[in-house]
Image (spheres, helix red, strand yellow):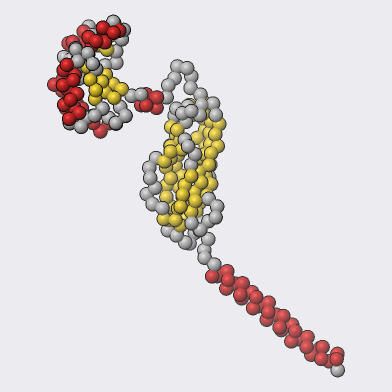
């Protein structure tokens, strides 16, 4: 009787075991189906190699981000290294599935002469615990003693403007000065205003400085704050430095 019962129970045991396995599979499948789709953010190139450049050259850097997943993605933060400067603000932070976005930066190589760099740009976004890593690398040749970066000129930028009549300018003027006669200076300043930034200095001089003072007052009243008059004009320059830096075109 015991043997018969065991034999009769085996099909039921197999059925119960099969049913449990199926139930577990169904529960697991249902759990997976209910999981939110994972955010997928890809980049067109993981490494930007600018090769070899001379110190002082600014390198434009572009990356294209693409949402390759099925869910919208929101960018939370982008971390860069100090010399990688954002060229323009992000036009958007939310990417729909299939949508793309360009990241635009500039690598400023001044100060990196003689170095080989490999830096990271980290893109943090919702739906991922780890950032998307973009690498940026290359080597920078140091400046020679006869070279200067463009940034040095802009940082210390100034101009000399001689407002005397052209025949006086040709007789003698300070080296590097350009000639804009007094009667034309206001129209000239208005025309170039979009290209003159607040960190630039434009020195105006005439023979003794009196006319330059009056001209600069008018320029500043018109909103051109970058202009200053050279005290004492050309005569004071010669009083202090003699013929140093004075050139003649005639």
From this view, report whether residue 98 is shown above or below residue 82. Answer: below
Quarter residue 240 falls in: top left
Q: Residue at x 55, y 52 (%)?
A: 130
Quarter of the N terminus within the rendering = bottom right
Quarter residue 214 falls in: top left
x then y, percent, for residue 219:
18, 27
Is residue 98 at all visible to an observer of this figure? no
**Count of numbered marks:** 0
Q: Residue at x 46, y 28 (%)?
A: 110
Is residue 153 at all visible to an observer of this figure? yes
Nearest the viewer among 198 and 120 is 198
Q: Residue at x 28, y 21 (%)?
A: 159
Q: Left or right: where does residue 107 sit relative to residue 6?
A: left
x then y, percent, for residue 238:
26, 7
x then y, percent, for residue 141:
51, 25
Quarter of the C terminus within the rendering = top left
Quarter residue 161 falls in: top left
């Amino acid at each position: 009787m015991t043997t018969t019962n065991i034999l009769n129970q085996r099909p039921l045991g197999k059925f119960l075991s099969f049913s449990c396995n199926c139930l577990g599979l169904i529960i697991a499948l249902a759990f997976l189906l209910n999981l939110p789709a994972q955010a997928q953010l890809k980049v067109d190139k993981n490494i930007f190699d600018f090769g070899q450049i001379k110190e002082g050259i600014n390198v434009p850097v572009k990356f294209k981000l693409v949402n390759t997943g099925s869910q919208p993605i929101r960018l939370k933060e982008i971390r860069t290294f100090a010399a990688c400067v954002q060229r323009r603000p992000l036009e958007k932070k939310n990417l729909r599935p299939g949508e793309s976005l360009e990241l635009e930066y500039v690598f400023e190589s001044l100060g990196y002469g003689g170095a080989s760099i490999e830096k990271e740009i980290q893109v943090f976004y919702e739906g991922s615990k780890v950032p998307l890593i973009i690498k940026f690398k290359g080597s920078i040749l140091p400046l020679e003693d006869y070279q200067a970066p463009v940034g040095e000129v802009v940082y210390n930028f100034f101009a000399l403007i001689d407002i005397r009549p052209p025949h006086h300018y040709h007789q003698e003027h300070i080296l590097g000065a350009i000639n804009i006669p007094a009667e034309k200076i206001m129209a000239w300043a208005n025309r170039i205003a979009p290209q003159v930034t607040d960190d630039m200095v434009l020195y105006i001089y005439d023979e003794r400085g009196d006319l330059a003072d009056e001209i600069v007052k008018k320029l500043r009243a018109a909103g051109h704050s970058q202009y200053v008059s050279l005290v004492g004009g050309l005569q004071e320059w010669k009083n202090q430095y003699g013929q140093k830096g004075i050139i003649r075109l005639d």
